[in-house]
Amino acid sequence: MGLTLRLSRVIPDCRSCPLYRFNGCVDNTAGSQRRGSFDNLRTINRHLQTSICLYQAEEGSSNAEDPDDVVNVVYIDRSGKRIPVKAKVGDNILYLAHKHGIDLEGACEASLACSTCHVYVNSAHFDKLPEPEEREDDMLDMAPMLQENSRLGCQIILTPDLDGIELTLPKVTRNFYVDGHVPKPH
Amino acid sequence: IGWSGKAFLSTSCCPKVCIVGSGPAGFYTAQHLIKARQDVEVDIYERLPVPFGLVRFGVAPDHPEVKNVINTFTQTAKHSRCSFYGNVNVGKDVTVGELQQAYHAVVLSYGAEGNRRVGVPGEDLRGVYSAKDFVGWYNGMPSCRELSPDLSCETAVILGQGNVALDVARILLSPLDALKKTDITQPALEALAESQVRKVLIVGRRGPMQVACTIKELREMVNLPGTRPEMVAADFEGVPEALKDLPRPRKRLTELLMKTAVEVPGDKELERRKNATKIWGFRFYRSPTEIFADPSHSRTAGIRLAVNRLEGSGERAQAVLTGEVEDVSCGLVISSIGYKSLPIDPSVPFDSRRAIVPNSVGRVHQAAGLYCSGWLKTGPTGVIATTMNNSFDTARSLLEDVDSGTLDISTGKPGSQIVSMLLEERGVKPVTFSDWEKIDSLEMRKGEACGKPREKLLTVEEMLKILHL
């Protein structure tokens, strides 16, 4: 079977879905002014189209996992705790973090209008990432504690050669949980 | 088997926290508290019937992505342990003292609603406005509705070189077609359609390496259709040599500024500039000393600027008067030199010199159970991300205090029950979050009719009327 179904891609690729083309998809409301394509991701469950929009299947549907698709990712949270995550090619680092309850904010919802998803990328993988576009660099300039290996999480899309990538959340605030307390996802 | 007397004798109460202000500071503080403990209940009080503070009234209409954060705030507001009470003026309808009695902790996050005055003669002439009021006007802030700025002049001078100054410049010079598709208010759109402003000078007392704006906003000016930059090359003396030692953000910003001001552009850009009908530029090393009235005294005619030189370099460089002055004709002066927090209640400590509530990591000095977050805590600078970190810090301080027992949650507190009673006695009608959602839907429907994301309601009366309050 030549068709690989990306069942847990966090970014819905709506262009090929018949509902998008005929304006039948509730996630593509006419008159929406926002150009970021991720604005309705939080409502992804409510608008789940079972047989047609296969791209929006949620976590837990691991029955069609293709091992070649798996990318191992490690998040290092603000208290230094390592959180390994099994992700898929095409996953977006910001939304992957949300899916796993990791404390990475995405205030502007991946539209390159803030720097709240700022992460440090481990050196072994940093150079494998495509160069940031100018707009990402502009927003990175605003991030506190900018380092050479800083990137915006919402702009990192997983590819097979990023297997093993480690993303460290900057300790941007003056105090943070040192006792290992993990804030619950909201 | 031993049992903790405390656990049996007093029902371990859920901590009840009250937050004053529903802008980014209020919401990010609430978000962090609710996420951290399953038993915290948060009530957010807001003076206006509508939430979100500067995200609604400060962020420029042509920056809709920045407003996406409203979705995060909406999630928080709709959380079972969070309640929103709009149309409640803390300090007037209910005192901070009463809130402290009703809740285990009170977090002040009401931001900065005042202006820093320039402090020169002529500041109160018609044609002179604070950027805060001008921005509030085009963003539909009810208190700025009557501003009716006079845009019937060719030159506008903006004092200050931060992002707010650039927002004002950009809105003054943007092609109307671009603005028509935003949530800018209808009266502002109409006024801008009639505007005769063709030249905007953005004036700062120091040099190019001290501008407070950031690169995204500068790039927007550089790329603004129909406009061309006009600056003084001599202002950039010494800058190329200093570039290599600058940290990355300042370096990239200065490089772009210099390129725009000094470099001879390529043919395509030259052509574009030739066809531009509007001009903008930074003017450096200038401080205002007086604003002049026109002979009939009815409006502004010009501004006197003292010429400075710099002592020192980098962020700490100081502007020093040289004795020279320069007069600039203009009919519009917009001062964008900073917002300012105001004291809310005599019982709350306030540092009038710095215009903040004195605190350590968000814990208000000499006031147990009182915290602050956002601009009220640190002063009015920073973007939403800065305020987010700042608010998380305050929330963490509060949680630490609960854990350590400094903040006593052993006795239950009535929270909103008693406050609602007080408000009812006083004839105050709080607006709930679902009430706001009705206003939100109405604004979006009205906007759809004219190709805008929303058409904002412009008065508190209108807002309360549609809610039948």
Image (cartoon, rainbow, N blue to C red):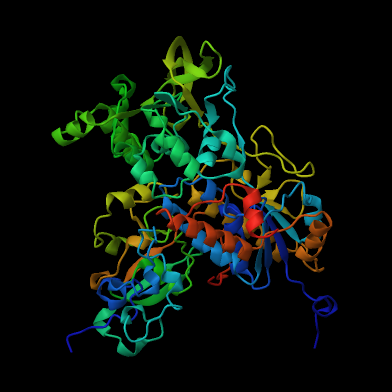
Please, is residue A63 above or below residue B214 in the view? Answer: below
- Residue A49, quarter of the rendered image: bottom left
Q: Quadrant of the N terminus of chain B?
A: bottom right
Q: Quadrant of the C terminus of chain B?
A: bottom right
Q: Residue A158, position in %: x, y?
A: 29, 69
Q: Residue furthest left?
A: B267
Along the line of sight, the residue nearer the viewer: B386 or B243: B386
**Residue plotted at (41% across, 85% down):** A60
- Residue B214, quarter of the rendered image: top left
Q: How many marks?
A: 0
**Residue plotted at (36% across, 78% down):** A56
Q: Is residue B178 left or right of residue B73?
A: left
**Residue plotted at (72% across, 43% down):** B344
Evaluate whether residue A114 shows in this view.
no
Q: Residue A41, position in %: x, y?
A: 41, 70
Along the line of sight, the residue nearer the viewer: A152 or A28: A28
Please, is residue B463 above or below residue B432 in the view? Answer: above
**Residue plotted at (42% across, 78% down):** A47
Q: Residue A101, position in %: x, y?
A: 48, 72
Q: Residue B323, position in %: x, y?
A: 47, 9
Evaluate whether residue A56 shows in this view.
yes
